[in-house]
Amino acid sequence: MATSFGATSTTDDVLSGVDLKGKRILVTGASAGIGVEAARALAAHGAQVVGAARDLGKAERATAQARKEAVAAGGSLELIELDLANLKSVRAAADALLAKGQPFDVVIANAGVMATPFGHTADGFETQFGTNHLGHFVLVNRIARLIRPGGRLVNLSSSGHRFSNVDLVDPNFERTPYEAFVAYGRSKTANILFAVEFDRRHRGRGVRAAAVHPGGIQTELGRHLGSGQLEGMFEQMNKQLAAEGKPPFQWKTIPQGAATSVWAAVVASPEEIGARYCENCHVGRIVADDVPISPISEGVRGYALDQTNAQALWTRSEEMVGEKFGEKF
């Protein structure tokens, strides 16, 4: 089944004939874009979906139709408050889920920001690394005991991980000149490495983790980019694609962009996607770090899947958030 889908597959294509009744799934970033679509598609196939969002009012409006589809299919979609840029909010959300005690079959760590101006989270971390990685690192690890044996973690990464490996010496750009896409690349590499190490720590109880690249989609994620900046990026990308003998860049639709998330979450086999990077509804190939490729071409850099790098990031992340997460429950 995994080989029958590709870049143009939608969430409905991937989930065709799939019954998710009895499955409980957490999706962060359920107030816009592919987070809303992933939540909708899963709930419309019978899953009990918990959507997390910073702005509950916005999430309520964005998921109104999705909640109707959920009810019609025997599923459900409820919302909880979660601000990934504030660890007090992250811990409060995790504590509430733990107090409720209902297990999850899948956690989709979807929320994120991209190419933000230089800034800091409520806890003093560089905005993109703090929001995209550290917020999810604390949330997922705190609720890890709720993930059922046989469950999965799906981290939303990006081909943008190729902009940079993680920097564990200066993660907050205290000594490094800030570049928005370098910071984004660090955070997206961290999303992959977190999945790699989480998979190593939890596969013994049947829980697997993967990272996914959704593709290029027009969503709120690009709100910090000016039109001139986007045009320049596309011009450069198309030159690189032409050099590779490939057609010009085309945006994915939101249902196409969310397809890989739901594919990795409930369709692909756990052995296939565990500790891997997925894109276009299949596992991505490793591309050597010195091989030039366009930002939207397929492939994952080796440093993003390196086990030693993943373990080092885990240790550094624990130091930064002031909390340790063991391998036993």
Image (spheres, grey):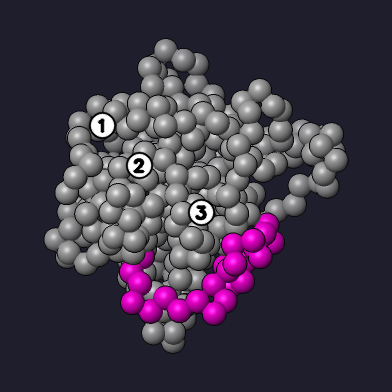
Residue sitting at the far top: 175
Q: Residues within 10 Å of mark 2 (few under 14, many from 20)?
A: some
Magenta stretch bounds: 1-26
Q: Main secondary structure of the magenta part?
A: loop
Three-letter amino acid code of the residue under disc 1: Glu
Vertical relation: 101 (above or below) 274: below
Q: Which secondary structure lies at badge 2?
A: helix
Q: Nearer the viewer, residue 222 or 111?
A: 111
Element type where label 3 sits in the image: helix
Q: Nearer the viewer, mark 1 or mark 2?
A: 2
Q: Which residue is mark 2?
A: 200
Q: Position of residue 190 (x, y in %)?
A: 43, 35
Amino acid type of the residue that numbered disc 3 sits on in the rendered structure? Glu
Relative placement, left or right, of 138 versus 114 is left
Q: Earlier in the sequence, mark 2 or mark 3?
A: 2
Residue 29 visible in rendering = no
